[in-house]
Amino acid sequence: MTRDRIFIFALAVTAIMASSCGPRRQEPLPYGQIPYYPPAAQKAQPYRVSAGDRLNVKFVYHDELNATPQVRPDGRVTMPGLGVFQATGLTPSDLEEAIYRRASLTLRDPELSVIVTDKSERRVYVGGEVRRPGYVPLTPGMTALRAIFERGGYLNTAKVDNVLVVNIGDDGQYEANVLNLRKVLETGDIRGDTFLTAHDVVFVPKTAVANADLWVNQYIRELIPIREPTTRFETIGQ
């Protein structure tokens, strides 16, 4: 093989390899088929104290300040000799820092630790037009639609395109969102669903939700205590 032929052969091999390694044209999906979008990976979040948690607060050199308080429904704990602290929504390290700052007013460089010894049960409530209204244990990746099916699924009278999800903050305020889960079921596009957090309420109505605040006042208040709420009303998946 001559030198010119070897050179041409090498160029041909290089071109073939480049075409095979490059991006391929994506074929269009068949008509009516919706691409599947998996939920974004949830990053590991630090644990935050919740109502009902049992804490162990231990001082190294001041045993008289040691305590094992349980977080009250209002989200606070009482420390002997130090007073009341807001606990819910904080990480154990955040609460430790808050106790340290107050103890430092009378003690010099106090050393302490805050440990959550018993965690309260994490669950959400599913009500309305479902087969078995009630609580669902909150597991990683739990969504509104999955919680509904955990309670037997929705009834034929359910307004699945107007499912109300109420998220209650640590300060007692709540955010009400309306999900179009019918669209999720019909298309398989799960972007219209939402991940749940502890103490959320999923309510499947019989008629369309025209005013989220009115629905919360009429139905949700009978299920869970909400303290002086404010509402942010959004519609998802319409």
Image: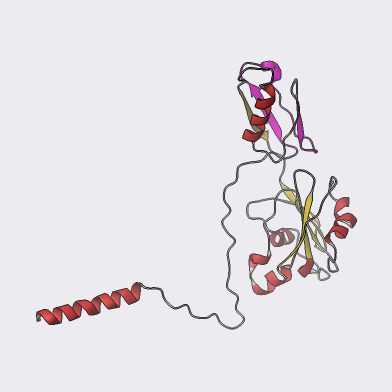
Residue 13 lies in what quarter of the image? bottom left
Numbered range of the magenta stretch:
51-79
For the residue pair 99 and 31, the one nearer the viewer reads as: 99
**x, y percent for residue 199:** 75, 48
User: How far from the left and from the top, in percent, is residue 193?
Assistant: 68, 63
Q: Residue at x 75, y 31 (%)?
A: 77
Assign the C terminus to one quadrant of the image.
Answer: bottom right
Picture coordinates of residue 179 (x, y %)? 74, 65
Q: Is residue 154 left or right of residue 95?
A: right
Find residue 39 and report its horizontal and vertical position in percent: 59, 61
Task: Name the residue at the right extreme.
Answer: 218
Magenta stretch: includes residue 76: yes
The vertical placement of 135 against 100, above or below, is: below
In this rendering, the answer to whether 97 lies above or below 125 is above
Q: Is residue 189 left or right of residue 19?
A: right
Q: Residue reaching furthest left?
A: 2
The colour scheme used here is secondary structure
Q: Quadrant of residue 208?
A: bottom right
Using the image, determine if residue 73 lies above or below residue 35.
Answer: above
- Residue visible at 67% across and 38% down? 90
43 in relation to 90, above or below: below
Q: Nearer the viewer, residue 127 or 61?
A: 61
Q: Say whether residue 109 is left or right of residue 24.
A: right
Q: Is residue 42 magenta?
A: no
